[in-house]
Amino acid sequence: MADTLLGTVRTWHVDRAFGWIATDQAVSCYFVHLDDVLGRVELRPDQHVRFMPVRTARGPRAVAVEILEEGSR
C-alpha cells in the first residue's frame, strides 16, 4: 500500500465531478474524481487534502481523498 500524500486542490469541475490535486513533493498533479473522495463531498480549489497516490495507465491518480480541517496541514 502506498504512503499518503498531502496536497492542495488546484481545480475542480463541478459539472464533471473531477479535478486536480497538486503536492509540494511532486512535479505533476494527481487526477481526482468525486468517486474517490471520502463521503463523496465536492472539493473546492485551495482545499487541503490527504490522499493515496496510485499510478494508472492514464497517469497519476488520487484515491481515498480526505479533506483536511484548517490548520491540520
Image (cartoon, rainbow, N blue to C red):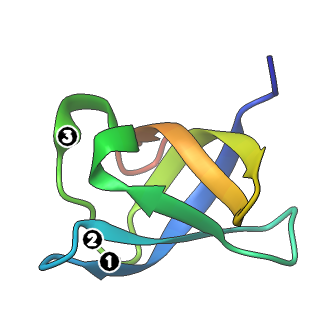
Judged from the image, the secondary structure of the residue bearing numbered disc 2 is: loop
Measured as percent of width and height from the top left, residue 34 is found at 28, 52
Residue found at x 38% / y 64%: 47
Identify which residue, 16 or 9, lies in the foreground.
Answer: 16
Per the rendering, the mark at residue 44 is 2
Judged from the image, the secondary structure of the residue bearing numbered disc 3 is: helix
Compare marks 1 and 3 and give the one earlier in the sequence: 1
In this rendering, would 22 be left or right of 39?
Answer: right
The reply to whether residue 15 is visible in this rendering is: yes
Neighbours of disc 3 within 10 Å: few (<14), some (14-19), many (20+)? few
CA–CA distance between discs 1 and 2?
6 Å
Residue found at x 79% / y 67%: 24
Residue on which the image places disc 1: 12
Measured as percent of width and height from the top left, residue 18 is found at 34, 68
Identify which residue, 35 or 37, lies in the foreground.
Answer: 35
Q: Nearer the viewer, mark 3 or mark 2?
A: 3
Amino acid residing under circle 3:
Arg
Question: Cβ–Cβ below 8 Å for labels 1 and 2?
Answer: yes
